[in-house]
Structure formats: structure tokens, C-alpha cells
Image: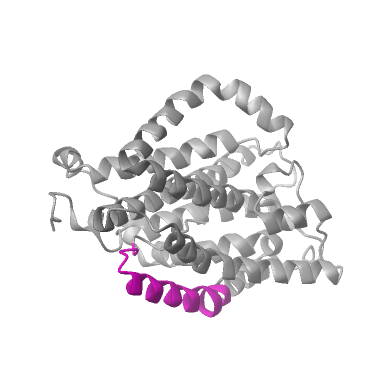
Amino acid sequence: MAGSNGRPEWVERGKIGGIDGLRGCAILGVLITHAAHVFLVDESDVLAPAADFLGRLGVQIFFAISGFLITLLLLREYDRAGSISLRGFYRRRTLRIIPAYVCYLTAIFAAAGAGWITIDATSSAAALTYTMDFVPRPSLPTEHIWTLSLEEQYYLIWPLAFATLGPRGAFRGLLAFLIATPLLRPAVESMLLSAGAHPTRILSSTTIAAGCLFAFVVWDRRAWPRLGRVRLPALLDHPALVWLGTLSYSLYLWQQPILMNNGWNDRLPFAARVVLTFASAAGSYHLIERPFLRLKERAANRAGAAVAVGGVPSL
């Protein structure tokens, strides 16, 4: 169905079909990689590179989705209201992200206090401040938080830039970033690595920016004569992938200390780890995420914001 400006209706309002399935593929790649680390003790195993690739690809898919969805949210709001409510944006992000994250941190800090797992002081501080992407060797239960840290920094900076510059200025700044990144990458990467940043930080930031750029492309009604022929694979609507995608944020949080070897679970059968991972994620989603999602939706409805684009965050 067409929207008011020649775009498909899903561009202007409502949820985007296939996004949860795409998230499901991404989290499946991460789970396969971490499962491989349990079984492939020798990193020189012929299957290790393929397994690692799936995890890295999954993370980059999450980043691209996040860049796309957040930018589409901002374009929708600017089109509707003529401005961006930063207070409303950050309130919605807080309700969506923080509750499940605080629950996870509380659990792992309690486990560390009981001596079941080990988390050093630097990792603890970085987890609390979303700066894990600048910790060279984080403790295993917090290692995966580098991705969430990078996304939080994006959530902080990009809406502020968009609100300040407007859509056109933000688009130009985005193009400048994407053009400059390959030219400045060696110097910037050296500086970031010397500061302890995650080795794929530049790539991941570029992936987020590419997702942002694609949102501008789909928002431009002149692109639709060509984009109209593009369709997401029907497989992405498969109920199993949609279910995985719905749980993806909580799954991503909880899989690290349960699925991978963390000392406390070394003797736990792998099948039991998988069951416990999914049980923890389901509990987090139904008991923590969903109640706060309802609060977020009520707050958005009161503000008149069109926010349902696929349940951001991506991780």
C-alpha cells in the first residue's frame, strides 16, 4: 500500500516486515559462533574461521538494522512534527534498553560476588558506563557488551546531530563521514587501537552509518520506481526466525555467560546450556522487556509519535 508521498506505507508508519526475521538470522550467527568456541578448542580447526565469520556477520547485521531503524524513526518524526524531541527519543530508548540491561548486570555482578564468575573492576566500570568498546581485554561475561556500548554512543550522538542539523544537514554529514572514513581509517584506527578500542570499531561504525544512509534512500520517494522491485526473502517471515528475532536482545545479553565456558558451567552439558540460555532470554523478554515496551508505547502514543518500526534496539 502506498503512503502519502509515493512511498510504501511501511516507510511512513507501522512495523517493517522481515526485520524480526533478519534479527533472528543475526542472533543465530552469534549463537553458532559462541557454540563453536565451546566445541572447537583448537582455534586452528578448519571450521573455526567459518564459525567466527557467522558471528561477525551477525553483529554487523545488527548494526546495520539499528542505523536504518533509528534514522527512519527520526525521519518519520521530523516529517510529522517538523522537529525532533530529544527528550522523547531518549526516554523511549531508556525504556527499551536499560531495564533488561540492568537486570543482566545485576545478575552477573551478583554471580561475581558469589565467586561463580570473574569480572574485573575495569570491565565492571565499562559495563556501567557503556564504554566496553574501549576495554582491550574485558572479562568474558561482559565481553559482548562492546556492541551495546557502540550502539549506545550512536543513540546518544546521531539523534542530537539530526535534531541540530535537520535531515539535509544530517544526510550531508553522514555522506562526509562515509567518504572520509576510508581515507582517514589508518590514522584513526591506529589512534583508537592505542586507546584500547575494539579492533572492528571503525568497521562497525561504518556499518551503522550505511544503515542510516539506506534509511534516507528509502525515505526518498524518487528511489521507489527502482526499490519497488526489491523484496526481502520470504524466509525472513518464518515463525522460528521471527521468534528468535523477538528474543534477540535478551538472547544476546544472556548467551555469553551461559553458553560459553565461564568456569561455573564447564561441567554443564551443552544442551542444558542452550535450554538455560533460552529460558533466561524468554524470562527477560516476558518479565522485563515487554512491560517496559508497553510503557514506551503508551508514552509514544501520548506524544503522538510514530515509533513502531520493528522494535529497536537491534541488539
Q: Position of residue 308 (x, y in %)?
A: 34, 64
Is residue 29 or residue 150 the one in the foreground? 150
Residue 141 magenta-highlighted:
no
Q: Residue at x 25, y 61 (%)?
A: 13
Q: Quadrant of residue 52?
A: top right
Q: Position of residue 206 (x, y in %)?
A: 48, 35
Is residue 294 or residue 200 the one in the foreground? 294
Q: Residue at x 54, y 50 (%)?
A: 151
Q: Quadrant of residue 309?
A: bottom left
Tell me which secondary structure the magenta stretch mostly adopts: helix
Residue range in magenta is: 283-308
Viewer can see residue 206: yes
Locate residue 303 relative to residue 315 in the image: left or right: left
Q: Residue at x 48, y 79 (%)?
A: 291
Is residue 208 or residue 30 the one in the foreground? 208
Locate residue 10 relative to residue 274 in the image: left or right: left
Residue 299 magenta-highlighted:
yes
Q: Is residue 141 above or below residue 198?
A: below
Which quadrant: the N terminus?
A: bottom left
Q: Is residue 300 above or below residue 46?
A: below
Viewer can see residue 260: no
Q: Position of residue 29 (x, y in %)?
A: 52, 51
Locate residue 81 relative to residue 294 in the image: left or right: left
Locate residue 300 relative to residue 204 in the image: left or right: left
Please count the marks in the image.
0
Q: Is the image coloured rainbow, by chain, by secondary structure, or in one colour?
A: one colour
Q: Residue at x 36, y 32 (%)?
A: 172
Q: Position of residue 224 (x, y in %)?
A: 17, 42
Is residue 112 or residue 124 the one in the foreground? 124
